[in-house]
Image (tube, rainbow, N blue to C red):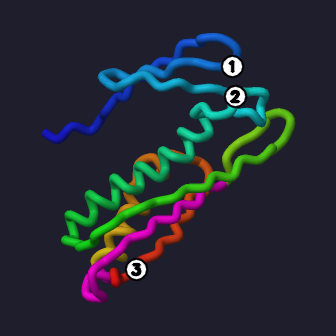
Amino acid sequence: MKQTDYYYPGAVTWVGERRGTLTLEGKPPLDVATPPEFDGHDNTITPEDLFVSSAAVCFMSSFLAMAKKVRANFSSFTCRANGKMELINKETGFQFTRIDLYPSIIISGEQDRDPVEKALKLAEQYCPISNSMKNDVVVNPEIKVAL
């Protein structure tokens, strides 16, 4: 029987000011902090960075899995992400309302476009991180033919 439940443990330990250390089982520790716009620190990864980036990383992972499934050929994949967080009201405060993903894929020729487009659509449909977010996740793909 195929496994249907997965768990991802993590912990954060406060180290002073508005900084902490994120520990994930079997992975290197990561310095984290409150962002500067909320009286935090510059040049340190924030929860907002991790939230937005998780959508991009998951989309990449989903795309790679779907590309293999549909036998899509490509030579490069990059995905930029931009999240919009806004003040909703005084009771709930800020929340993300939208994340735009900008995957850019390079293919060797037009014969590869349809399978790559299919893999992109499937990745958008099955990405578990995007599917778990209550904000909109909008995918804006760009497919280029290598010169």
Image-based side of 9 in relation to 47, left or right: left
Residue 16 at what x, y percent from top left? 65, 11
Hey, which residue is sitting farthest left in the picture?
Answer: 1
Spatial separation of the CA atoms under disc 3 and disc 1: 43 Å
Instruction: Find out whether the residues at labels 2 and 1 contact each other: C-beta distance under 8 Å.
Output: yes
Task: Determine the secondary structure under disc 1.
Answer: loop
Mark sitting earlier along the chain (2/1): 1
Task: Determine the secondary structure under disc 3.
Answer: strand
Q: Quadrant of the N terminus?
A: top left
**Disc number for residue 110:** none
Under mark 3, the amino acid is Lys
Residue 96 at what x, y percent from top left? 67, 47
Spatial separation of the CA atoms under disc 3 and disc 2: 38 Å
| Count of marks, rendered view | 3
Under mark 1, the amino acid is Arg
Task: Determine the secondary structure under disc 2.
Answer: loop
Image-based side of 124 in relation to 5, left or right: right
Q: Is residue 55 above or below residue 31?
A: below
Hey, which residue is sitting farthest right in the picture?
Answer: 90
Residue receiving disc 2: 41
Q: Quadrant of the C terminus?
A: bottom left
Under mark 2, the amino acid is His
Residue receiving disc 1: 18
Mark sitting earlier along the chain (3/2): 2
Residue at 38% across / 71% down in the picture?
105
Residue receiving disc 3: 144
Please check the rendered image and state whether residue 68 is part of the magenta-colored stretch, yes or no: no
Residue 50 at what x, y percent from top left? 53, 39
Q: Which residues are magenta?
A: 98-114
Q: Is residue 52 above or below residue 34?
A: below
Residue at 31% across / 82% down in the picture?
114
Residue at 58% across / 41% down in the picture?
49
